[in-house]
Amino acid sequence: MPVSVEPTSVDPSQNGSAPANTGVDTPTTAGAGARTSAPAAEALRPHAEDAFADELAALAAQDDRPRPIRWNLSPWAVATYLLGGTLPDGTVITPKYVGPRRIIEVAVTTLATDRALLLLGVPGTAKTWVSEHLAAAVSGDSTLLVQGTAGTPEEAIRYGWNYAQLLAHGPSRDALVPSPVMRAMAEGMTARVEELTRIPADVQDTLITILSEKTLPIPELGQEVQAVRGFNLIATANDRDRGVNDLSSALRRRFNTVVLPLPESVEAEVDIVSRRVDQIGRSLDLPAVPDGVDEIRRVVTVFRELRDGVTSDGRTKVKSPSDTLSTAEAISVVTNGLALAAHFGDGVLRPSDVAAGILGAVVRDPAADRVVWQEYLEAVVRERDGWKDFYRACREVSA
């Protein structure tokens, strides 16, 4: 028999999973009812629906296109929110994703069907970022999240139990602690599963019944939760990192897969890094990005050349390091450099501010990667016009 899950009756603290995460990702199993009372302006990293509340409200007010049931915006408005644009009243919607428009259109269209969405790509291609903003635009809530790790249990996807209630009264509705996926099914919202391939294979397959039958059985109670219209799921995955678990063919068939590519050009990647660093920097009171555009371009160039195994002019082949040099890592290097410039410099991003960060990103294997970096410095950086200061800074931190 079907059972409804009331969001107001659940205390997320009862879940055995750790709910706190102060890094880039949102809480592991927090749902809509688990929001803290801290205002968005005080949050180190506001949820997408809070950080861009004005844009979402402007889109909703002017969106006169058909909306799927329980969607806050039409598919066209969701795509506009992700890709950016100017509304008829002059409101500017900032781009959240810089890349081929068709990729976002296919992703949004998938969510409007009964097929789940799998965002696939190498590390640093904005899979988590796109997932969060899609959920924020569609459901107005990006926090129905399961963070995949090697230790993610089946309960994180299905449901858990309040063991005090369970021991005192046995299996009951009051003792059941719904997962973010169960909450999304009951409320017709968008759930997210991050790093799906890091979850053990037997736990991954918990999703098969949910995605194919749109039902989550609760055998202990002789009940089930049936997904209501509006429910869907976004998963992210990559097959480049160590420690990944291949998806079974049965599970993969339940998804429409959209591959997010690396930025096509230096200009596109510089634009992405500049936008994200500017957003992060404003929340940390760091210097403005325009003062460091030259260094951003230099960081991006180094990362792309080492990643591609060839210099930007195509004339010199170089060895690639053992790890992926992603756009996300470039953002981290530049943000750390701006912090150094702000607190220990004159506020202007210089080669000495980014050199240590680049070294840390490139040299993950102290033996092999250090050789790759030294050869790149001597064969490429040393001979490049206008890069003398950068060469000296990198030599200094590499010594």
Image (cartoon, helix red, strand yellow):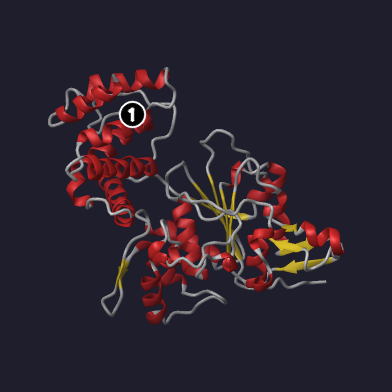
Q: In this view, does 16 lie above or below 398?
A: below
x then y, percent, for residue 244:
59, 37
Q: Quadrant of residue 316?
A: top left
Residue at the location (35% across, 32% down)?
A: 308
x then y, percent, for residue 76:
42, 71
For the C terminus, which image quadrant?
A: top left
Q: In which quarter of the image is residue 218?
A: bottom right
Element carrying mark 1? helix
Horizontal placement of 318 versus 127: left or right?
left
Within-10-Å neighbours for mark 1: few <14, some 14–19, many 20+: some
For the N terminus, which image quadrant?
A: bottom right
Camera-nearest residue between 313 and 70: 70
From where the camera sits, is residue 24 visible? yes
Amino acid type shown at disc 1: Leu
Q: In which quarter of the image is residue 337?
A: top left
From where the camera sits, is residue 220 visible? no
Horizontal placement of 347 versus 100: left or right?
left
Dot 1 corresponds to which residue? Answer: 359
Looking at the image, how many numbered discs can be counted on the residues? 1
Residue at the location (38% across, 65% down)?
A: 41
Horizontal placement of 118 versus 327: left or right?
right
Residue at the location (43% across, 50% down)?
A: 126
Q: In this view, does 138 lie above or below 125?
A: below
Q: Is residue 305 above or below residue 286?
A: above
Residue farthest to the left, as pictured: 386
x then y, percent, for residue 305:
30, 32
Residue at the location (17% across, 48% down)?
A: 291
x then y, percent, for residue 235:
57, 53
